[in-house]
Amino acid sequence: MITLKAWAKINISLKILNKRDDGFHNLETTLVTINLADFLDIKEIESGIIIESEGLNIKPEANLCYQAADIFKRRFNITKGVKIKLIKNIPVGGGLGGGSADAACVLKGMNELFNLNVPDEELMELSKEIGSDVPFFIKGGAAYARGRGEELKFFKLSRMSFVLYYPGYPISTKWAYEAYDEFILTHQHEMDNIIEKKDGKKKKIRKSFVLENDFEKVVFKKHPDLEDVKAHLIAAGAFIVSLSGSGSCLFAVTDENIKKKVIKYLEGIGAQFFEVVTI
């Protein structure tokens, strides 16, 4: 049996560039793994794929762990089966990539379980069949991502400290993208690519990339409580406060002194929160 940790991620920034012809979106984002993790036990069985996880009320075939195991078995002609026990600690629908991290962990775990020694690069290519951000979790660390999120450039990042706030409810990534597309259609003046007339000709001017998350434009409108908490975290002294992914988690960048003030506020409102660092 193989036991692994599936580390969560934070999007330090997220910029949605445009909608693609295939229905997905091009984006720019910086991803970092943090020391909040799900736990997976992967055991060889005679046949089939069994997923055990308390609190996940979805069909096994819809679980990304199942899909990862199925893809791995078919790609490498594995006749034996696997039983996967998943213990969830990463909030579902929190924008922390828990499902994708779990799927990447299954690929790595099965690679080890069946002694195949498949290189990370091949696992990353295979993982694109599961989801756009799964390849990042094969390596983890810090990476700048483009395209659908699968075009990755890894880099070294100094250790950072965060406080994560989870509001107690999930946000659907599918809904967030649909709401953002609708927002862009009805708020052309707030688009980040603007048109300026110069010498009678139209010229595209692109704004500089800053540490912000485009999903906040629509998520905060539906969930004003998140915007209120963000304002209080900033007032407590946090250097940066932003949504991670499409939410629902907010992260606050702090030092040790500011962390105490941030935690005092969150404890005061009875919030669920996590103290984490980059890994």
Image (spheres, rainbow, N blue to C red):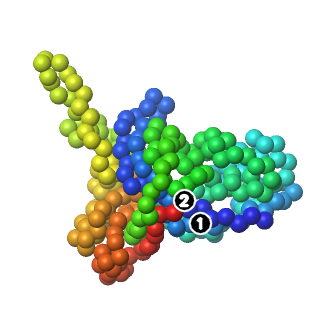
Q: Is residue 262 visible?
A: no
> How far apart are labels 2 and 1 at the CA level?
7 Å
- Measured as percent of width and height from the top left, residue 19 is found at 40, 34
- Give above or below for 270 relative to 78: below
Residue 258 at x, y = what percent? 30, 75
The x, y position of residue 261, in whole percent, is 29, 78
Residue topped by disc 2: 98
Tell me the element at label 2.
helix
Q: Nearer the viewer, residue 134 or 168?
A: 134
The residue depicted at 61 percent of the width and 58 percent of the height is 102
Mark 2 Cα shell of 10 Å, populated few (<14), some (14-19), many (≥20): many
- Relative to 29, does residue 84 appear above or below in the rendering? below
Contact (Cβ within 8 Å) of mark 2 with mark 1: yes
Q: Quadrant of residue 43?
A: bottom right
Which residue bears the numbered disc 1? 38
Q: Which mark is residue 158?
A: none
Q: Position of residue 228 (x, y in %)?
A: 26, 66
- Residue at 38%, 64% in the rendered image: 251
Q: Residue at x 29, y 48 (%)?
A: 210
Query: Can residue 240 be seen here?
Result: yes
The tally of labels here is 2
Q: Is residue 190 above or below residue 273?
A: above
Q: Quadrant of residue 84?
A: bottom right
Quadrant showing the N terminus? bottom right
- 156 or 93, which lies in front? 156
Foreground of the two, 27 or 118: 118
| Amino acid of disc 1 | Asp
Tag 1's secondary structure? strand
